[in-house]
Image (cartoon, rainbow, N blue to C red):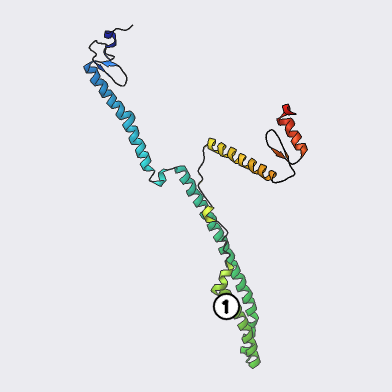
Amino acid sequence: MATINELNFCSACNKTQAKSICAGCKKYFCRKDFKEHEQQLSIKFDNDIVRSHDELLEQMQKLEKSNYLSLDLFDQIEQWKKTAIKKVEKAADKVHHELIELIDKQRMIMTKQLEPITREIRSLRKEENFAEDDINRLRKKINEIQQKLKQFIEKDTNKSIIIDNNQIDWNHLICIREIQPRSKRKNESKKNQKIVQTQQRMSMAQNSYYYTCAICGNAFLTNAYLQAHMHRRHPNYE
């Protein structure tokens, strides 16, 4: 059994003048070593507690800057944005090229329609052999081509050339989904499974043509299913 003197040994220098005890570690110290022990505790408190607290607080304050949180996810969003922009630009370039081809096509069609009129006008002017009927006929042909050109270049008509697809749901084209812990997902899966089973039983209970297990209460559409259930789940009750 330890004596009083043995209990009062200084745990640092092993001297007998140990009159101070630490309330935390329950060790005895002499006055000198007790002060050093307090200083060591103060340093340890600053290093282990205060510094850890300050680092944690600094990290939490950085959350106010959105770019600091989940940098990899922000990089993925930025990469998705660049890819989406490239796809939109590619689609716009394609439609732009198609519009140029359409304009050139219509211009060539109207040019070919105007060529014989141009030749006839030059011929009549050169020979100075034309009458009122020629003027009215040529005016009618020119007006027809002019009307086609007007319809093609009108602002309202140009709108019908570009097809705007409003079926894209831009609000849900990309989204953030919180990943739930696996245990929570399992609990929700079991809960949903029980709900489905309950709904199935209630649905079957509404039908008068069903067979119910007297042991567990499960319902079956045919007696054969019930007998198979009894054989599989309750063999001792057969």
The tally of labels here is 1
* Badge 1: residue crowd in 10 Å (few <14, some 14–19, many ≥20): few
| Residue sitting at the far right | 224
Vertical relation: 40 (above or below) 79:
above
In the image, 17 versus 44, the foreground residue is 17
The amino acid pointed to by label 1 is Lys
Vertical relation: 139 (above or below) 26:
below
| Residue 102 placement, left or right of 28 | right
Which quadrant holds the C terminus? top right
Residue, x 59% and y 68% (percent of image)?
A: 161
Which quadrant of the figure has residue 231?
top right
Residue, x 75% and y 34% (percent of image)?
A: 228
Residue, x 25% and y 24% (percent of image)?
A: 39
Which quadrant of the figure has residue 30?
top left
In the image, 75 versus 31, the foreground residue is 31
Which quadrant of the figure has residue 48?
top left
Vertical relation: 187 (above or below) 2:
below
In the image, 185 versus 194, the foreground residue is 194
Label 1: element kind: helix
Q: Is residue 35 visible?
A: yes
| Residue 181 placement, left or right of 204 | left
| Residue 174 location (% of width, % of height) | 52, 50
| Residue 110 location (% of width, % of height) | 62, 76
Q: Is residue 131 visible?
A: no
User: Which residue has dot 1 on it?
Assistant: 150
Which quadrant holds the N terminus? top left
| Residue 148 location (% of width, % of height) | 61, 77
| Residue 199 location (% of width, % of height) | 64, 44
